[in-house]
Image (cartoon, rainbow, N blue to C red):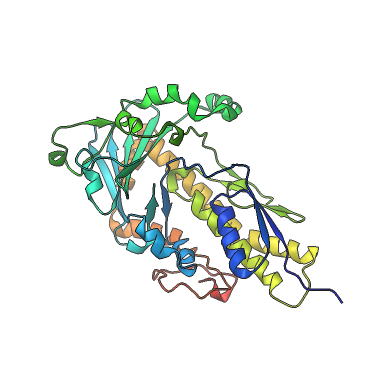
Amino acid sequence: MTEHRPPKVLISGAGLGGLMLAIILERARIPYHIYERAPSVKPLGAALGLNANILPVFDQLGLLPELQKIAFPCTDLELCHETLRPIGAIDISGFKDNGIHLTNPLDPEKYPVLKDERCHFTTVIGHQKAHTWFTCSLPGNRISFIVAEQLDENTAKEIAFRNAEWTPESNEKMINEVRHFPFKHARSEAEANGEKLVLGDLIDSTRPESISKVFLEEKLFETWHDGRTVLIGDACHKMQPSAGQGAVNAMEDAVVLANCLYDISSGKEPVTAERIAEAFRDYREQRYPHAKFQVQNSKEMARLLNGQTWMERLVRTLIYNLPTWLVSQKYLKQAGCRQQIILMATAANTPDLEVYPQSHPNAI
């Protein structure tokens, strides 16, 4: 008689996807081990945005109240010229339950945007330069900032080849290039009181080890699994960060994969290689269409925020001045994919949105 045992899962990497998978496997009583090469947690100071796609899972796990204590709701996305003259803004205040942001303390008198109990997310488009920079206010009197540079194809290939050489110690040249870039530190010109701040002010208030240089690329692989090995997150679908979907989709992968593993572990049948392969196929079939959509969506957002041609500038102005109802339609389409953990009760605080069909009745 074959003894029924759940599979033992080996997780390579304690990133957001790997940790989410481990938490769900723990609740499902499926044995697992996590292998991580870093000897300790080393925060890089980046902000993290969570939306309606993944927040219900945190609600199921009982972690949503803890997130809300260290988070600000994001109500709008503002776009400015390098002179800080507004181009437009996207109002997302109608989706109060759908946004969460997370990330060294600063003086609120010098940075008045920190006085608000909400996230101020501002994008500045460089004038006649291939740079776009982003700032967002965070709990604990912090500001997170990112500078993106558009590269031509040949330069991108050369830099990708030298990617492994990038360390905080080799960032000096990059930092000096962006120090003079202005950013919006106040909610209005009157509040700014004529004072203009630059990214150098933020850089000088940041620990050097918290500043990193990353080569941004996008990939979508067709093969997600082979034998007893399966990929999640950036390993199978690497996205541009412009749409804020990379971390969210990695965690969504973890939820669906955990659901599929639970399905083959909770019955009386033995867990065979064939059933594991079937679970992996089911996982890919559920996740691939949405991952493909988000890879393309992230690519379009990167072009929208970083493009320097006259057509890209025109489209950018139009998009950031669309009526709220049109913005709502696009947002609702993205929020429709909301996976949930099948072995736990459906999240009580799930926003009232139309949801795409899931493979399990408890998944919505």
> Which percent across, then down, holds residue 219?
59, 43
- From the top left corner, tell me how far across and down residue 343 is, in percent: 58, 73
State whether residue 253 is above or below residue 149: below
Looking at the image, residue 94 lies above or below residue 310: below
Residue drawn at 49 percent across, 54 percent down: 248
Determine the image quadrant of residue 262.
Answer: bottom right
- In this picture, residue 98 sits left or right of residue 12: left
Q: Which residue is drawn at 68% across and 74% down?
A: 266
Residue 331: % across, % down: 39, 58
123 relative to 57, above or below: above
Q: In this view, does 274 lie to the left or right of 130?
A: right
Specify whether 272 is left or right of 244: right
The quadrant of the picture occupied by the N terminus is bottom right
Where does the image place residue 177, in percent across and percent down from the top left?
A: 38, 23
Within the image, what quadrant is residue 10 found in? bottom right
The reply to whether residue 321 is visible in this rendering is no
78 vs 52: above or below: above
Q: Which residue is drawn at 29% across and 31% down?
A: 201
